[in-house]
Image: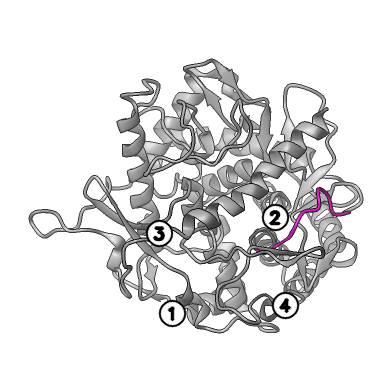
Amino acid sequence: MAERDASSKAVSRRDLLKRIAAIAGLPLIEWPTAFPFAAAADEHGQPALPPAPTALSPADDQFLDELEKANFLYFREQANPQTGLVRDRCNVRTNDNSVVASIAATGFGLTALCIGQKRGLISLPEAKSRTLTGLRFLWKKLPTHRGFFYHFANISTGERTWDSEVSSVDTAILLCGVLTCRQHFGPHSEIGELAGEIFERVDWTWLSEDTSLLPHGWTPEIGFLPYRWDNYSELMMMYLLGLGSAAYPLKAETWDAWKRAPFEYDGLRYIGSFAPLFVHQYSQAWFDFRNKRDKYTDYFHNSAIATDVHRRFCLELAKEFPDYSDDLWGITSSDSPKGYVFWGGPPAMGPIDGTVVPSAAAGSVPFLPQPTMRVLQNIKNRYPTAWCRYGFVNAFNPLSGWYDSDVVGIDTGITMVMAENSRTGFIWETFMKNPEALRGMARAGFSPHGLVSP
């Protein structure tokens, strides 16, 4: 039964890719070649900016420490010790025997080992052993095509499950975790060598053979999927990794190929897309966009604006859903009583019903520390059923009394990584030591600027 339920949620998540592609195809207003800092001007000619970010307080740091410890347990307990693959999701109310792992959750799991070792949650020998197990399995046994991995795999055997696609963006998330481990545990160790081999095997030129817009994936049955990564989203990590490849690099013009559509809400202007808040978070879990910009914008600043816009959007929704307040907001793709849902905004997407998704705020803590921390601490203090062994459940609805039974690996992962980045910048600093990351950002045209990001 658990397998069938999990499968239906995974199918919804694959359909989500199609929905993003379909929505992204809608006509948008003309986007400019340069969009400085994604800010509109107010009546005095000054840029409209979100609230100034503030530093974390000692209480905030203590809370995030507790949250990271809980998150780490997920990646320690829900990883197969023989393969290193991490379960896609876990039911925390029952004994979950599901066998489906996701390569994206595994990428977050590898990153979690680095954080856990740094934080003293796992010994260095055990962290290295688990990392080696995972990288050896990725290199020698997990099925690939041109170096790219299937989205879902059997956690014990690595066998492709649910006829899933070879996923371009999920492979990118996995590679970010792989490269983080290389720098944390030593680029000249066996971990470093395996990480380099796994990355160098990925043939980005195959993915971009006849297009500057990368496809979502490929299957043996139908070939390339018809959907392209053509609008601003979590795609940045994928393009930057491809640009940074020494073996099979993307052409430099691929960075300019995808659209950066301007949105405006409540006087704030930013680059966005018709997609949930997570699209502003995932690439920035590893790539450090602080105090730098390409010819289009400062993406860190852009994500801060997008987060504040989402907060304001939820406050406006309080007229219909009175649970939303400055202490409780956040809607991004998540579980619901009716299955996995693609929802968020602005503009409003999906059947919004008052559900709160903790990872929406948690994934944006570096962008707006004070507003997001207020939400997370409020959830922990006022809604104890939303908290479990692994931190926050995926979603809950205070109006209906519904609380999810599941924790989702990628949402737990973005929560843990952004919590650590907010506290120390550790993952940013570690990942950005990789020459592939530096080369990718350089080829995309990034350079420092004078603004200071938190």
Dot 4 amino acid type: Asp
- Residue annotated with mark 1: 445
Q: In this rendering, would 150 be left or right of 236? A: right
Dot 2 amino acid type: Gly
Residue 42 vs residue 437, the one in the foreground? 42
Quarter-of-image position of residue 215: bottom right
Dot 1 amino acid type: Gly
- Circle on res. 372: none
Q: CA distance from mark 3 to mark 2?
A: 22 Å
Quadrant location of the C terminus in the rendered image: bottom left
- Residue bounds of the magenta highlight: 159-168
What element does badge 4 sit on? loop
Most common SS among magenta residues: loop
Judged by depth in the image, the label closer to the viewer, 4 or 3, is 4
Q: CA distance from mark 3 to mark 1?
A: 15 Å
- Residue annotated with mark 4: 203
- Residue annotated with mark 2: 107
